[in-house]
Amino acid sequence: MEVTEIGENFITMSMPVNSKVHQPLGMLHGGAVAALAENVASLAANIVAGKDKACYGLSLNTNHIKSVKSGMVYATATPIHIGRSTHVWKVETRNEVNELINTTTMTMAVINK
């Protein structure tokens, strides 16, 4: 997983789809997509929270839309809510032709370091 783009209101990370992240039927494992979504949302939340705060996951809700067997996937996190004690982030994961393969909502706790 690596950061591929940072914008004013979003962060995108990519992940290759290969045998390392396949489930037994040869498709991208849902857990790998969830890990990518949590990674990009956590990174975004911690950047927004600043150096005196830390963000930790409270809830991850993920919906798988389409399967992927190979190539790259791209997960983009955008804020839904940025509060003092919680953040809520929407993550859309898309394939190389920009088809939606997963949508995730992640809630983060914001605490003092």
Image (spheres, rainbow, N blue to C red):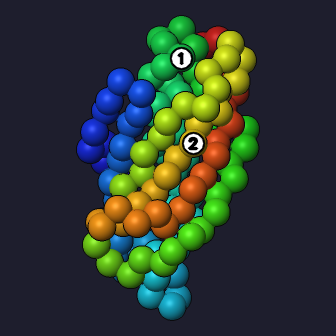
Quarter location, residue 81: top right
Q: Where is residue 101 in the image (x, y as percent from the top left)?
A: 49, 67
Tell me which numbered mark, 1 or 2, is placed earlier along the sequence. 1
Q: Position of residue 75 (x, y in %)?
A: 42, 51
The residue located at (59%, 68%) in the rendering is 64
Q: Position of residue 47 (x, y in %)?
A: 45, 22
Which circle marks residue 49 in the picture? 1
**Element type at marker 1?**
helix
Residue 73 in sight from this viewpoint: no
Q: Quadrant of the C terminus?
A: top right
Q: For marks 1 and 2, give the CA distance.
A: 16 Å
Quarter location, residue 19: bottom left
Residue furthest top in the image: 52
The residue located at (35%, 24%) in the rendering is 8
Which circle marks residue 4 in the picture? none
Count numbered badges in the picture. 2
Circles 1 and 2: CB atoms closer than 8 Å = no
In this rendering, is residue 62 above or below 27?
above
The amino acid type found where label 2 is placed reads Lys
The residue located at (48%, 78%) in the rendering is 67
Q: From the viewer's perspective, tell me whether residue 15 is left or right of residue 67.
A: left
Q: From the viewer's perspective, tell me whether residue 108 is left or right of residue 31.
A: right
The amino acid type found where label 1 is placed reads Ala
The residue located at (60%, 52%) in the rendering is 104
Which circle marks residue 90 in the picture? 2
**Element type at marker 2?**
strand
Local packing at callout 2 (Cα closer than 10 Å; few below 14, some 14-19, many 20+) is: many
Local packing at callout 1 (Cα closer than 10 Å; few below 14, some 14-19, many 20+) is: many
